[in-house]
Image: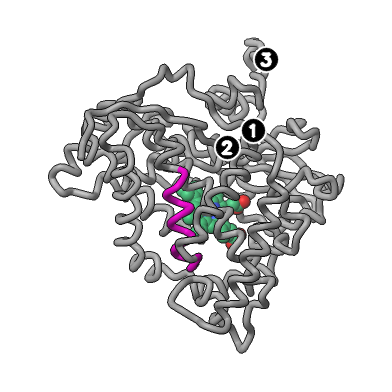
Amino acid sequence: MSDTPVPARPELFTWEFAADPYPAYAWLREHAPVHRTTLPSGVEAWLVTRYADARQALADSRLSKNPAHHSEQAHRTGRVGIPGERQADLMTHLLNIDPPDHTRLRRLVSKAFTPRRVAEFEPRVQQLTDRLIDSFAGRGEADLIHEFAFPLPIYAICDLLGVPAEDQDDFRDWAGMMIRHHGGQRGGVGRAVKKMRAYLLELIHRKRADLGDDLISGLIRASDHGEHLTENEAAAMAFILLFAGFETTVNLIGNGLYALLRNPGQRELLQAALGRGDGALLETGIEELLRYDGPVELATWRFATRPLSIGGVDIPVGDPVLVVLAAADRDPARFADENTLDLARKDNPHLGFGHGIHYCIGAPLARLEGRSAIGTLLTRLPDLHLAADPSELRWRGGLIMRGLRELPVGFTPAS
Ligand code: HEM
């Protein structure tokens, strides 16, 4: 045995940690890969940081997604789950339920939210991307979070769901309140969720009478062995698609562009490939950006329903388990040169979209938006550069998501 003392555990969940959590995750992987800690909310939870343990935990049916299994019942005090959701029946969504309910709802939504529907949506995403870039291209400077990464996913998912254009700015406002709440700023989120719920129920009601080609109509139409979604289930589904598909994609675009701006060699390779009309590096590149600095830092809550052991550590029944995707995806036991951004990385089974039955249902849409946003921006504004010192950039301090509050850039004005 070595006599070398174990260095002290780095602080978790501070502002420095938010700016760069990776050294702390390296410490956890090495010295305490399954680690019980107190979260900023006061809830005690296990953090799982090694890749092999993370994959196992994500697929373990003894870990429930239903907050009713939490021994502290912390969800009752609103400390677990999506902000504001408890006031409504939006709670019964995919990320909060287990089989057989999960299997039934997931099968129904999969019938409406198909890869084909997403592929057909590509020209619309491209149009939205170009329209947003047009709005700041002539100016020579922009904040890529507020003017680009934030509006693109909200307009895209609203369009896909079938929210009329004239109502989409309301969604932009509600989403803004929710993202600020996640960043630690309170106020207005309960109201935003309530308004969104009322709006979605009303929209579903209207669409039922006049079905179209949109995803909400698809959700209403979808049936499985004669079973349909109820109006409340359809509203909860539309809500989770918006909620799960929004801030995540903002962060894919924001973190992804930031990583490229800080790795000029990789960014030049990508721009050269795009200039040749070769999209292969953009495809592997999006996967690498998801691995290197992914939008979902910690997978959503899981609770032990039966005794289990992860990485040799016994987890008592009722304890919450948080799988740290950002740590697992930098595990040197799985990824060579784990801290290097390599857009051409081939062997890249990252956990950025999760794993097992809750694997991200929106992955094809997220990839499409990521390719369109990053590929188009680097092509249209080729000399894009950071307009702030990285140490000045602020990260949102939420628990589950990882993303920048702002990303100021400069470039030669273009038409
Ligand atoms: C689930 C990541 C975009 C809808 C998940 C999970 C992850 C994830 C990690 C699993 C969570 C867990 O097991 O605890 C991401 C990332 C995205 C993204 C990184 C963007 C880059 C989207 C989009 C949509 C979406 C665009 C829909 C429009 C969902 C839904 C679930 C989910 C509904 C729950 C699936 C289930 O429980 O069966 N996502 N997501 N996501 N995602 Fe995504």
Q: Main secondary structure of the magenta part?
A: helix
Q: Is residue 278 above or below residue 141?
A: below
Amino acid type indicated by mark 1? Pro
**Label 2 CA crowd tier, 10 Å (few <14, some 14–19, many 20+):** many
Q: Are marks 2 and 1 in contact (CB under 8 Å)?
A: yes
Q: CA distance from mark 1 to mark 3?
A: 15 Å
**Label 3 CA crowd tier, 10 Å (few <14, some 14–19, many 20+):** few
What residue lies at 41% left-to-right and 59% top-to-bottom? 364
* Residue 155 inside the magenta-drawn segment: yes
Q: Is ligand 1 within 8 Å of the beta carbon of the residue shown at mark 2?
A: no
Q: Is residue 43 above or below residue 123?
A: above
Q: Residue furthest bottom?
A: 226
Quarter of the rendering occupied by the N terminus: top right
What residue lies at 77% left-to-right and 31% top-to-bottom? 38
* Residue 1 inside the magenta-drawn segment: no
Q: In this rendering, would 385 be left or right of 355?
A: left
Instruction: Determine the image quadrant of residue 26.
Output: top right
Q: Where ligand 1 lies, by image quadrant?
A: bottom right
Amino acid type indicated by mark 2? Arg
**Label 1 CA crowd tier, 10 Å (few <14, some 14–19, many 20+):** many
Location of mark 3 (residue): 8
Q: Is residue 349 above or below residue 18?
A: below
**In this orientation, which residue lies closer to the viewer: 381 or 287?**
381
Location of mark 1 (residue): 33
Instruction: Determine the image quadrant of residue 29.
Output: top right
Q: In this rendering, would 308 be left or right of 168?
A: right
| Residue 78 in picture, x, y percent from top left | 79, 46
Q: CA distance from mark 2 to mark 1?
A: 6 Å
Location of mark 2 (residue): 50
Q: What segment carries the magenta color?
A: 150-163
Give me the disc on residue 395.
none
| Residue 256 in picture, x, y percent from top left | 39, 37
